Image (cartoon, rainbow, N blue to C red):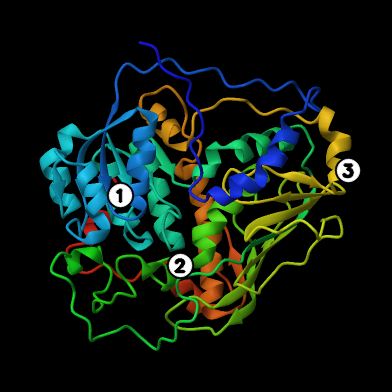
Amino acid sequence: MTRKPLTPSPASRRLFLKQSAAAASLILLGRAPLGAQLEAPPAPSAPTRKVRTALIGIGNRGWDLIRSFEDTGLVEWTAAADVDFMAAHCTEARTRLEGVPLYQDFREMLAKRGDAIEAVVIATPDFSHTPIAMVCMAAGKHVYVEKPLAPTFHEIDLLMEQARRTGVVTQMGNQGHSGANYFQFKAWSEAGVIKDVTRIDAYMNGVRRWHGWKVDGFADTEIAPPTVDWDLWHAGRPLKPYSRKLHPQEWRGWFGYGSGALGDWAAHILDTAHRFLDLGIPSAVEALRRDEPSDFIFPQASTLRFSVPARGDKPACEVTWYDGVDNLPPLPAEDDPTVQRQSAGKFIYGGGMVFKGGSHEAPLRIIPATRMQELGPGLPKIPPKYSNHYANFALACLGLEEARSPFSVSGPLSQFLALGIIAQQIGGRLEFDHERRVFTNSDAANRLLSPPPARAGWGKYCELAG
């Protein structure tokens, strides 16, 4: 069986690929690396079969995932579920999945089609990830879960422990973690190009769905469409009245349902820095700015400062996050003010150098450009070919690769962000004890480390296996 080489698929935000093309060409010019010669990972053995895969959440992001996984040629859909699969936003996905058994309730799907399912792709709203992924892992299914893993710190602890106990393959859907930036950051940090990082400024300044909203609670006048199982949509969370500001897409802007710009975008912007700089869990997070704070939705703009203590030979580091249309980070003196700045990205300061990066798989540049050109011949090369994030998961399920963003890696990143979400919600400076997994100076913050108690009948779906 002959198989074409696997190459990265386009990032969901193509803007970043266009803006990083020039940087990528510079990176690939490297000839004599500063560290040991880097080699492309060996090509995996050609798989002899496809992974029998179910999808939970077929509309919106789910529709993107259908196409991305099909493009790998490594999966076959054997079942699918969505609480609102007859809605308009599911039409394209429903047509594409014609002939695949489709259910409204993921539990019924697992009960009736479990023997035909090896892996499950979960593309439901953030707040419902935990019960769905927990029960799938308990059933021995490999799981791919969209980012972030969950909105709360202790839910992520549960997911990581379930993955450890069951031994299934896990992957979080921060797809850039299998792209050029992943291999570049890994190579540059191992070779000592990126070192002694003491400061990271990361930002997302695009318009978000909740910008401009004025809410003082949940709507109570709308009637749920007949296509949706509104009770099931809540996945055990407290039942709220139906609102178009919650479903099918607006849930992301609400505390307890989504993770705001931080959870949505920092998982793509800070992922490689978090991993290869061993940022772990911060000792403190402080809300420096919260525009129009609300008890219900994320601020219109926020600035957060995460304090990361020294780790081994790595110095203490401050990570500052900026979101909101006009909430811009300071530009380093080395940056070229004539170059159009991306709406999402980062500046990394360390070892006497400044690195400028975008989001997803967009590679880093050393600034100023003259410094990048000077170092170019000695910079480590990155592999010219590698499996993309979706293929990597499928190949891991087949035992041919290791997942690049398993819960053991993506869990601490998601927890880093979850602590920031709490600061966005209540403000102030919050001190965190990593060993005890609690804040030391705020009872209100500690109450937000866990989700609200599950409604009757749902608690069993978050039980640990064995």
Q: Residue at x 46, y 25 (%)?
A: 401
Which picture quadrant has residue 74? top left
Residue 213's place in the image compared with 315, above or below, is below
Which element type, helix, strand or loop, lies under badge 2? loop
User: Residue 388: percent from the left, percent from the top?
Assistant: 49, 34
Q: Residues within 10 Å of mark 3 (few under 14, many from 20)?
A: few
**Mark nearer the viewer, 2 or 3:** 3
Residue type, label 2 = Leu
Which picture quadrant has residue 127? bottom left
Report if residue 437 is visible in the image: no
Q: Residues within 10 Å of mark 1 (few under 14, many from 20)?
A: many
User: Which of 321/462 is in front?
Assistant: 321
Residue 108's place in the image compared with 10, above or below, is below
Q: Which residue is mark 2?
A: 449
Q: Which residue is mark 1?
A: 134
Which element type, helix, strand or loop, lies under badge 3? helix
Q: Which residue is mark 3?
A: 370
Which element type, helix, strand or loop, lies under badge 1? helix
Q: Residue at x 49, y 75 (%)?
A: 298
Residue type, label 1 = Met
User: Residue 144: percent from the left, percent from the top?
Assistant: 37, 43
**Mark nearer the viewer, 3 or 1:** 3
User: Residue 76: percent from the left, percent from the top?
Assistant: 26, 31
Of pointers 2 and 1, the one earlier in the residue sequence: 1
User: Residue 141: percent from the left, percent from the top?
Assistant: 28, 37
Q: Residue furthest bottom?
A: 216
- Marks 2 and 3, how far apart in space? 46 Å
Residue type, label 3 = Thr
Q: Residue at x 62, y 61 (%)?
A: 343
Of pointers 2 and 3, the one earlier in the residue sequence: 3
Q: Residue at x 30, y 69 (%)?
A: 247
